[in-house]
Image (cartoon, grey):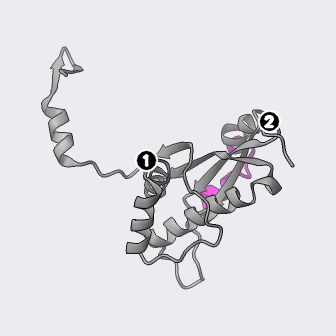
C-alpha cells in the first residue's frame, strides 16, 4: 500500500515518430523535457504512438491512434500501484492529431467519448478505467472551431492601435 504522498504524478509524452522517440535518448532532449520533471517527483513516459502495426502497414489512422492513446492511459491508471503513480494526476503531451486526442481526453465527458468510440467501432479496452487527464500539453494542435462562435467572437473584437479588445 502507498501513501498518497509517496505516489508521483505522471506525464505521458506521445512522440510523433521513431526519430522523436529516439531523440529522448540524447542528453539535451532528456535535460529539456525530462530531468526537471523527475527531480520534482513527476514520472515521465515517452511512447512512440505512431509506430506501424506491421512492416507493410505504415499508414496509421485516427481510430488506431485514439485506441492506442486510450489503452496507454488506462494501462497506467490500472497499474498505478505497481508503477507508484497517482492515477488522479496524469498528464499527456501530444502533437498534431494526437494533441486533438489528448484534448478529447481532458475535456470530453466519458459518455461523449463512448459515443465517439461506438461510431469508430473500437473494441473495449480491458482495463475499463477513466481516461480523463488533468494536464494537456499541445504542440501544433489540430483543433476545429465552431465557425458560428468564431464569427461571433470576431464580430465583438475592436482593434485600437494594433491591440485587440473584447467589447463584451
Q: Position of residue 110 (x, y in %)?
A: 47, 57
Q: Quadrant of the C terminus?
A: top left
Residue 107 is marked as: none
Q: Residue at x 44, y 53 (%)?
A: 109
Residue at image coords 56%, 56%: 131
| Residue 89 percent location from the top left of the image | 65, 43
41 or 80, nearer to the observer: 80
Q: Is residue 16 above or below residue 36?
A: below
Residue 82 point in image, percent of width and height: 82, 57
Q: Is residue 102 left or right of residue 156?
A: right
Q: Which residue is mark 1?
A: 140
Residue 141, above or below 78: above
Q: Secondary structure at mark 1?
A: loop
Tell me which residue sits at (53%, 77%) in the image.
123
Residue, disc 2: 5
Q: Is residue 105 magenta?
A: no
- 22 or 148, which lies in front? 148
Residue 29: image x %, image y %? Answer: 68, 44
State the separation of the CA atoms marked 2 and 1: 34 Å
Binning the other alpha carbons within 10 Å of mark 1 as few (below 14), some (14 to 19) or many (20 upward) gives few
Q: Which region shows up in magenta?
A: 17-29
Amino acid at each position: 500500500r502507498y501513501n498518497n504522498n509517496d505516489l508521483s504524478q505522471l506525464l505521458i509524452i506521445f512522440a510523433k515518430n521513431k526519430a522523436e522517440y529516439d531523440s529522448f535518448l540524447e542528453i539535451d532532449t532528456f535535460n529539456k523535457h525530462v530531468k526537471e520533471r523527475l527531480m520534482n517527483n513527476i514520472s515521465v513516459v515517452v511512447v512512440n504512438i505512431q509506430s506501424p502495426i506491421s512492416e507493410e502497414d505504415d499508414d496509421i489512422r485516427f481510430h488506431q491512434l485514439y485506441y492506442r492513446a486510450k489503452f496507454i492511459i488506462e494501462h497506467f491508471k490500472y497499474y498505478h500501484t505497481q508503477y507508484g503513480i497517482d492515477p488522479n494526476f496524469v498528464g499527456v503531451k501530444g502533437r498534431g492529431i494526437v494533441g486533438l486526442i489528448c484534448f478529447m481526453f481532458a475535456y470530453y465527458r466519458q459518455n461523449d467519448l463512448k459515443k465517439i468510440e461506438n461510431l469508430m467501432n473500437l473494441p473495449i479496452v480491458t482495463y475499463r478505467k477513466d481516461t480523463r487527464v488533468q494536464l494537456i500539453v499541445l504542440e501544433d494542435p489540430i483543433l476545429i472551431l465552431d465557425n458560428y462562435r468564431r464569427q461571433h467572437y470576431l464580430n465583438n473584437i475592436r482593434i485600437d492601435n494594433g491591440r485587440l479588445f473584447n467589447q463584451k
